[in-house]
Amino acid sequence: MTMETLRKSRILILGAAGRDFHNFNVVYRLDPTVEVVAFTAAQIPGIAGRRYPASLAGPRYPQGIPIVDESELEAVCRRERVDQVVFAYSDVPHEHVMHLASRALACGADFLLLGPARTQIQAARLVIAISAVRTGCGKSQASRYLSHWLKQQGLRVAVLRHPMPYGDLEQEAVQRFADRSDLTAACCTVEEREEYEPHIALGHVVYAGVDYGRIAEAAAAEADLLLWEGGNNDFPFLKPDLHIVLTDPLRPGHELSHHPGEAVLRMADVAVVMKTDSAEPVAIHAVEANIRRLNPGATIVRAASPVTLDDAAAVRGKKVVVVEDGPTVTHGGMAWGAGLLAAQRAGAEVLDPRPWAAPEIAAVFERYPHIGPVLPAVGYSEAQLAALAQTLDRAEVAAVIAATPIDLAALIRVNKPIVRARYEYAEVETPGLLGEVAAFLRRAGLSVR
């Protein structure tokens, strides 16, 4: 046997602190035939320059694994003699994936996408998964709606959220959130709070972290059913028994153009067309036609995302700044979200926040020039959160409309009132989503009230 035969395949994983770590954990961590030389980081600030710790990487990586910026792809490939580049993040155009593939191929490496068969964990409980074709389709409100109904059926439900490990990775291997104090203790970012806090307010336990083998085991120990809530447009880390995929008629055609959203839609058991209360009929029909073409076996359900303001009278006729859900209007590609819609319906005058943007916020606008006259709720670091508060303080308006799912006023203090815009899932037809889920539970042998 030659030395070349014995040489381990050298792998570089392109990621964004989520799918990349999961793929490593379940596919590569214990494989003696490969060596992962590095992760790269994209989308999320503050990830590059760290290491995936040895405690998570396992005994084959006693020094851990470096995390570098994606711009270093070619340099790492050449320096480390990389054999395979593995793409492992989500919510990007198909063209973006192939540009990265071209960069890898030009260095002589293979380019690889790992699929569900190799990366999904078989849980010890039934799994219902909620995914989407893009960030900002409405997974959060759909999962809140469904988890609340499941709880009413007498089922113990644990919500497993797609990872957002932006802090100390060792401390975030397995995270369990049952109270708002848990969020504070874990130093959660605004984006994490947006996803976890609404579930906690409804009395649901949320699991997240880095090691989903251990997370699934811990969640199964206290639940009858696991509800997977995806991030971006990724496919589930757990093998679903029922896979619900959301589409967005405010962005018709995106179900065909983004990775891995198209793949996720092709996997769906139930495809939900969201926002039918605000989208044009022609866009709704276009999305439904694409669903039928990509996945003729999926059941199609229509749903609404009604938006309400806590105090519409407080902003009527007044100048306001609108704060939108961060990921939806950054890498999600939306120019605006539910907050702008709520402000317009309430008769408020929306002002563009750019003239008052603190430097950290101005950098976000520069990176995402498609953003409309709204302010993304960014807060990946204390400095960024302080910049958000500073921008709102500077704004020459009477009030702030906050359409982030968290209570922004409880997180930052500003010199003007913050009025919350809330958006929830609403059925618009019968049997609707609950009818499909109820039928699934009956087939699985669970009683439904």
Image: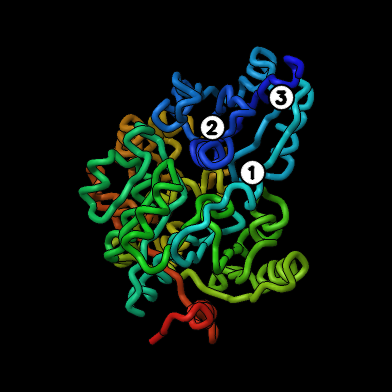
User: Which of 345/385 is in front?
Assistant: 385
The answer to which quarter of the image holds residue 313 is bottom left
Q: Which residue is found at the position 25% from the left and 50% from the top? A: 409
Circle 3: residue type: Asp
Q: Which residue is found at the position 51% from the left and 37% from the top? A: 21
Circle 1: residue type: Val
Mark 2 — residue? 366
Q: Position of residue 6 (x, y in %)?
A: 70, 20
> Mark 2 or mark 3, which has the lower sequence index?
3
Report crowding for label 1: few under 14, some 14 to 19, many 20 or more residues within 10 A (C-alpha).
many
> Mark 1 or mark 2, which has the lower sequence index?
1
Report crowding for label 2: few under 14, some 14 to 19, many 20 or more residues within 10 A (C-alpha).
few
Mark 3 — residue? 83
Q: Position of residue 93 (x, y in %)?
A: 68, 44
Q: Position of residue 401 (x, y in %)?
A: 35, 55
In three-dimensional space, the C-alpha distance between marks 2 and 3, rounded to whole angstroms, equals 35 Å
Which of discs 1 and 3 lies nearer the camera? The answer is 3
In three-dimensional space, the C-alpha distance between marks 1 and 3, rounded to whole angstroms, equals 24 Å
